[in-house]
Image: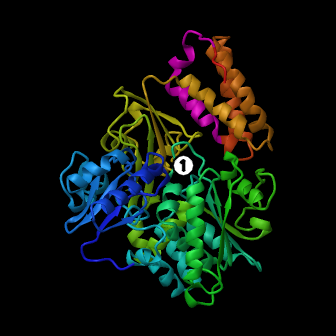
Amino acid sequence: MTLSSDTVRIFVPIDAAALSVGAEAVARNIAREAQARGLAVEIVRNGSRGMLWLEPLVEVETPAGRIAYGPVAGKDVAGLFDAGFQSGGSHALRLGLTEELDWMKRQQRLTFERIGVTDPLSLADYRAHGGVAGLEKALALSADDVVEAVRASGLRGRGGAGFPTGIKWKTVQNARAEQKYIVCNADEGDSGTFADRMLIEGDPFLLIEGMTIAAIAVGATRGYIYLRSEYPHAFKTLQRAILKAQGAGIIGDSVLGSHHAFHLEVRLGAGAYICGEETSLLESLEGKRALVRAKPPIPALQGLFGKPTIVNNVLSFAAVPWILDHGAQAYADYGLGRSRGTLPVQLGGNVKRGGLIELAFGISLREIIEDMGGGTLSGRPIRAVQVGGPLGAYLTAAQLDVAMDYEALAAMRAMLGHGGIVVFDDSVDMAKQARFAFAFCAKESCGKCTPCRIGATRGVEVMDRIIAGTERPKNIAVLRDLSKLMTDASLCAMGGLTPMPVLSALNHFPEDFDRPALPMAAE
């Protein structure tokens, strides 16, 4: 498309979060209003910048930079044109230069540097903003050098386990097999997490590039993206991006004209939380019931269809192109201790400004919630914060100065997980939250091992007795004993981590386990 010099570029997000609050109507109204006024505009459907309380966030390209307006509703569009927003005019919804907004200025965006900036499905846009550079550099290196770069960067699994990515890749590289696989775990099921979805919808070529680099490094020729079934927009975006990447020779029989072949497919998940566990995911990919496998053997040696397989999260693969392009040390220069690079934090729950924040490891939980999140939406005091999904620990308001760091949180009997943060004010009942953890596990367990399958069910029953005031001291003793059993004997982290939110609620908020009994609400 050839644009005249007076054509105005207007950006309206196509991210699912923006669509859920009317972005499609905003884009339509902008097109209609511009046509009615005889104005030449190009509407670019970009990803979300991550400031979800401002969605739909509309940006206008001006000589001074992109000016943000938001949140924009369809009914606001005519007034925006009346105010001359197509040239950055003043309006009540005008926020100023997007890059100068405090939310953006405080971040260190490496993985998310393009998201919200580019058209997610434009390869030309992707290349113009540094895309494919990492893959090109990987092709110029030996496989050993690629794996070493990932190892030296300090990149760890961003899906929650925090296992060193380079060690996993080296294991697969050293394995001898006629076929190896690259599998991306995009079954993002943790409460309060949405970074995988945002990246797939906002910069899908980045994930494709990262997986292709992994394939080159370990000698794999096939890859699969196992995508959460509740992500229809991400699914369509990935399908289109893969076709475009194939057409451009980025993947296929010859990666960028090299002797490397890499074929990539996206598969929708089975709709169960347990499919986020890597071996359960592999079982599902093979067309079986998603039951957790006993380990050993590990997937790196016997994974998909019994072949050596890299299983990494979306954010792990997406970090790799930046590392190959800028160097391992440049990535390792961010963060602290054994937590290197950046972490995409997802802030939600009872908070004024929720969204996606990418920061170097080491920032405190308090800075994220109070400074960037603005505290609670209700205006009431923060009472509890859950970090790491539904199986993560509950922290108190007094513990918020902990650094966002794998080891610092582990020292507090908590976990970083996928970087999801859910905030609760002082109206929360922590005994009911503990019950929820057991109920969630009982519903989502694959059922293979008794400690998880039966333990979670018994946990719900014990919590019901405690909440009802029945022999509380005895039942709290049973609760602790049951939690130890599940932690020590469960086959995977589903049952093994369920006691983490339960015990943190009990230890940090004991008063909620000794309240006057109330009638139990029906589920």
Eyeballing the image, is 499 above or below 102?
above
What residue sits 75% from the left and 56% below the top?
A: 284
Q: As drawn, which residue projects farthest toward the top? A: 516
Q: Is residue 385 left or right of residue 282?
A: left
Residue nearest the observer in this picture, 466 or 228? 228
Can the viewer see residue 291? yes
- Place of residue 182 in the rendered image (x, y in percent of width and height, measured from the top left): 66, 70
What residue sits 56% from the left and 77% below the top?
A: 245
- Place of residue 192 in the rendered image (x, y in percent of width and height, measured from the top left): 51, 43
**Does the magenta run of residues contain 516?**
yes
* Residue count near mark 1 (Cα–Cα under 10 Å), binned few <14, some 14–19, many ≥20: many
- Place of residue 105 in the rendered image (x, y in percent of width and height, measured from the top left): 28, 56
Asked which quadrant contains residue 89, the reply is bottom left
Q: Dot 1 lies on which element?
A: loop
Q: Is residue 208 left or right of residue 339?
A: right
Q: Is residue 454 left or right of residue 1?
A: right
Find disc 1 in the rendering and name its residue: 417
Residue nearest the observer in this picture, 269 or 336? 269
Prevailing SS of the magenta stretch? helix
User: Which of the colour schemes (rainbow, by chain, secondary structure, one colour) is used?
Assistant: rainbow
Count of labels in the image = 1
What residue sits 33% from the left and 55% below the top?
A: 58
Which residues make up the magenta segment? 497-519
Amino acid marked by disc 1: Gly
**Does the magenta run of residues contain 138?**
no
Residue nearest the observer in this picture, 436 or 86? 86
What residue sits 28% from the left and 71% below the top?
A: 7
- Place of residue 147 in the rendered image (x, y in percent of width and height, measured from the top left): 56, 76
Q: Is residue 193 left or right of residue 474?
A: left
Eyeballing the image, is 466 above or below 82?
above
